[in-house]
Amino acid sequence: MASNAFVLCKVRHSVSLSPCHAVDARVGIEQDLTEQLMRYSEALQGVVLSFSNVQLGRPNGTIVNEMPYIHCKVLTDALVFRPKEGMMLRGVVNKIGSNHVGMLFAGVFNGSVAEAELPKGYVHNYAQDCWLGEDGSSISVEDEVEVKVLRVHVAGGMIAIEATMRFDAAGVAKSTAPKKVKKTSHLNLAAGEPVTKPIKEKKTKKTKKVDEAEDKQEKKSKKRKHEKPDEEVVEEEPVEAEEVKVKSKKHKHKDKDAKKKKHKKTKHD
């Protein structure tokens, strides 16, 4: 039994070229071969991945009856993915289900391992999204696992592999990519530690500006209380002096009027 699912085989392929490719037949041949890539071929019993060393079997083509197409034979090397029952494959887990484990082979082809075909003792863990074993091992996303092919299903030119992990020396190779682990904090309730930590208030830029403005206003008001109002004192003193002068002038005018009246009376007498 073959141990490698990738097979390189010689292929003799018939191509029907349209009249537009009569000048350059290679273009038509390449278009015909590319249409068959990544599809299951019954003749090759696998999925064609690539073609190489393309050559014409004969230098001339043939036209059958009155059909416009030119028929020719092509010799080429085809790389085929051909998994078979009982073959060992390595896949990378891409999905964890409650009743199966999904994976990819060669990064392209789908495969799955049912719950009944997982190693004995494995239980699905919803919290960690993985399958845990009795010995502490686990199967999670991005792990590389080795499986044994049970059946190959073909539908619409695509394949799906059904596999098992119940065989000797079945193992899981952990991925090297570091995974983020959430840090858990443990509280010592016996020592009287609070369950909830005090929340520190964060001051925003707006609150800081408001606080600074209030501090400035308080400082200004304090300065005004301690300082003497010089301007008010300067304005009051001359006003009082002017009023006094005005009063004194009024008294002088009254005295003069009284003296004049006395002189007039004496003249009449």
Image (spheres, rainbow, N blue to C red):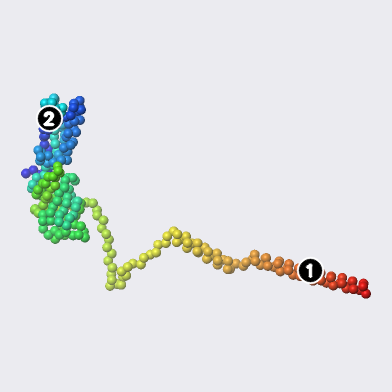
Query: Based on the displayed image, in which of its 4 quarters is residue 4 positioned?
Result: top left
Q: Nearer the viewer, residue 36 or 68?
A: 68
N-term mark: 2 or 1: 2
Relative placement, left or right, of 33 versus 221 is: left
Label 1 Cα crowd, 10 Å radius (few <14 / some 14-19 / many 20+): few
Q: Nearer the viewer, residue 64 or 161?
A: 64
Q: Residue shown at 15%/40% (left/top)?
A: 39
Q: Residue shown at 42%/60% (left/top)?
A: 204
Q: Residue shown at 13%/26% (left/top)?
A: 66
Q: How many marks?
A: 2
Q: CA distance from mark 2 to mark 1?
A: 141 Å
- Is the N terminus in the top left, top right, bottom left or bottom right quadrant? top left
Label 2 Cα crowd, 10 Å radius (few <14 / some 14-19 / many 20+): some
- Is the C terminus in the top left, top right, bottom left or bottom right quadrant? bottom right
Dots 2, 1 in contact, CB < 8 A: no
- Which residue is identified by label 2? 73
Q: Work out which residue is located at the far left of the displayed protein and give it.
A: 1
Whole-percent x, y for residue 78 in the image: 14, 36
Q: Is residue 75 visible?
A: no
In this view, 255 is above or below 152: below
Label 1 sits on a secondary structure element that is helix
Q: Which mark is residue 249?
A: 1
Query: Based on the displayed image, in which of its 4 quarters is residue 57 positioned?
Result: top left
Q: Residue shown at 89%/71% (left/top)?
A: 264
Label 2 sits on a secondary structure element that is strand
Q: Which mark is residue 223?
A: none
Relative placement, left or right, of 210 versus 18 is: right
Whole-percent x, y for residue 133 in the image: 14, 59
Q: Is residue 207 visible?
A: yes
Whole-percent x, y for residue 107 in the image: 19, 46
Q: Amino acid at mark 1?
A: Lys
